[in-house]
Amino acid sequence: GNSVTQMEGPVTLSEEAFLTINCTYTATGYPSLFWYVQYPGEGLQLLLKATKADDKGSNKGFEATYRKETTSFHLEKGSVQVSDSAVYFCALSDLGTSYDKVIFGPGTSLSVIP
Amino acid sequence: EAQVTQNPRYLITVTGKKLTVTCSQNMNHEYMSWYRQDPGLGLRQIYYSMNVEVTDKGDVPEGYKVSRKEKRNFPLILESPSPNQTSLYFCASRLNGQAGANVLTFGAGSRLTVL
């Protein structure tokens, strides 16, 4: 079945460091791909998405490119801030279901220290 | 403000004592869903509803019930809670079809502890 794999956390970075969180997926067809972010004590919220191969999603300085050849959707940010400390979830829409089920990865916890 | 509201946010209960976690959305979304979040497992879907009076099992429905009598509300019912249902629960909603574009709006979460 379809699935999402993310790098294990927690990840700890110093402020202004470069961030990469790896995400790979297994899917039939051409799913849409997402990154959701969960700030402490809150629900998940959409960070960015890409709906087809080679699309780049971007928001709040974060970017991710839909790479079909490597089945990847890695999240990057050039200079992280303390306020970026959160849990990041990679997800895909499962086209094999009748209602576009969203499948989430296990999440990667990021801590940014001053 | 467009939002999904869950209550209670925190609850400690004992094995076997029935409880209900409420979920309400004010965005006129057709689709609603419940997830549980456990360390290392990410979010797993419990139940979902495509519209009023239409509900279906997700990946981990055992021990849970839901109902969808109104479009805005989607309560999660634990008839006889057990310790393995200790978890963080999220309700989410979206529009159906292309309009929804699979972008879910989540509630703030309900942390449940079953002793």
Image: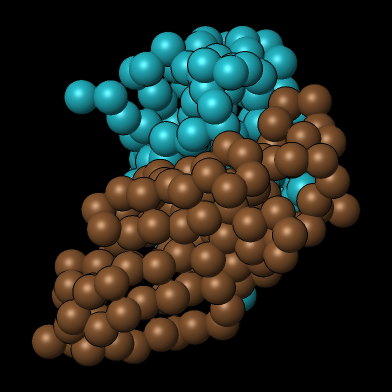
Chain colours: A brown, B cyan
Image position of A60 (left or right of A27) = left
- A24 in relation to B6, above or below: below
Most foreground residue, B14 or A67: A67
Seen at 48% across and 35% down, the residue is: B104
Picture quadrant of residue A93: top right
Most foreground residue, B69 or A26: A26
Most foreground residue, A19 or B62: A19
- B97 in relation to B103, above or below: above
Provide residue B6's location: percent of width, then percent of height.
38, 38
Picture quadrant of residue A10: bottom left
Provide residue B78's location: percent of width, then percent of height.
63, 44
Q: Is residue A105 at least partly visible in the picture?
A: no
- A51 in relation to A8, above or below: above
Seen at 57% across and 78% down, the residue is: A7
Seen at 12% across and 87% down, the residue is: A114
- B46 in relation to A65, above or below: above
Quadrant location, the C terminus of chain B: bottom right
Q: Residue furthest left?
A: A114
